[in-house]
Image (tube, grey):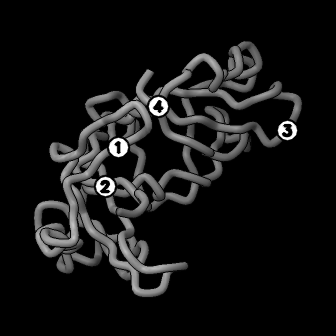
Amino acid sequence: IGSVENAILNQDNRIVALIAEVGGIWDIGDTHVAIPWQEIELTDTGIRAPVSEDNIDDYGLFDEAYVTRQDLSHANQVEDDVMTGPRTWKITDLLNDYASIDDGEGYGYVTNALFSKEGILQALVIDPSEERYGQGPYAYPFYGYEQDWNPGSSSYQISYSSEEVKQLPAFDYAKYPGPWN
């Protein structure tokens, strides 16, 4: 029916809903909907959502359980003026953020996120911006609010020193033949 545009996560770093873009052609006439994670079916090729032409109105983007129009002082804007509320955040709040290492030194960019089958964010994949840190990408555990991370931050700090990151093995996407391995 469309494509996943974003994931909404709660304060426990667990996906609560996916934002999907449905209908339209080339971003003309499309609609964004929020699909609760518990209604998503994981398949060998990706995900299956229960949204159809007949029930699309049941998946409104401004469902109070996930996205709210109130409390905008704690919100971050996303596609089509969608806002997440306090302690609820989007995966795009992290992707493409600049990452620094423990001593504050610049390190690289967050390029991907790794989730468990249950929808819990496990790790972030970061590509180093300088060769002195080795050939990336590298995957680092994600702790979120436990380490005083804030979704509104424009950068992400990993808990490794410059010497430690040089010793880590590169993350190998080839070792994960399917989306849920």
Locate the C terminus by quadrant.
Answer: top left
Amino acid at dot 4? Pro
Question: How far is the residue under mark 1 from the one under mark 4?
Answer: 10 Å
Compared with residue 96, is residue 137 higher up or lower down, i.e. above or below? above
Amino acid at dot 2: Leu
The front one of 114 and 177 is 177
Secondary structure category for the residue under label 4? loop
Sequence-first tag of 3 and 2: 2
Residue corresponding to mark 4: 179
Left or right: residue 130 versus residue 149 is: right
Left or right: 161 in relation to 47? right
- Quadrant position of the N terminus in the picture: bottom left
Instruction: Answer yes or no: is residue 7 visible.
Output: yes
> To which residue does mark 3 refer?
130
Q: Earlier in the sequence, mark 1 or mark 4?
A: 1
Q: Residue at x 66, y 34 (%)?
A: 103
Q: Position of residue 31 (x, y in %)?
A: 33, 78
Amino acid, disc 1: Ile
Label 3: element kind: loop
Return the disc, 2 or 4, that comes first in the chain's sequence: 2
Question: Residue 33 bears which disc, if any?
Answer: none
Of marks 2 and 4, the one in the foreground: 4
Mark nearest the camera among 4 and 3 is 4
**Cα distance in 3D space between marks 3 and 2:** 33 Å
Tell me the amino acid under the disc marked 3.
Glu
- For the residues bearing labels 1 and 2, Cβ distance under 8 angstroms: yes
**What is the x, y in percent for residue 167?**
73, 13
Residue under circle 1?
47
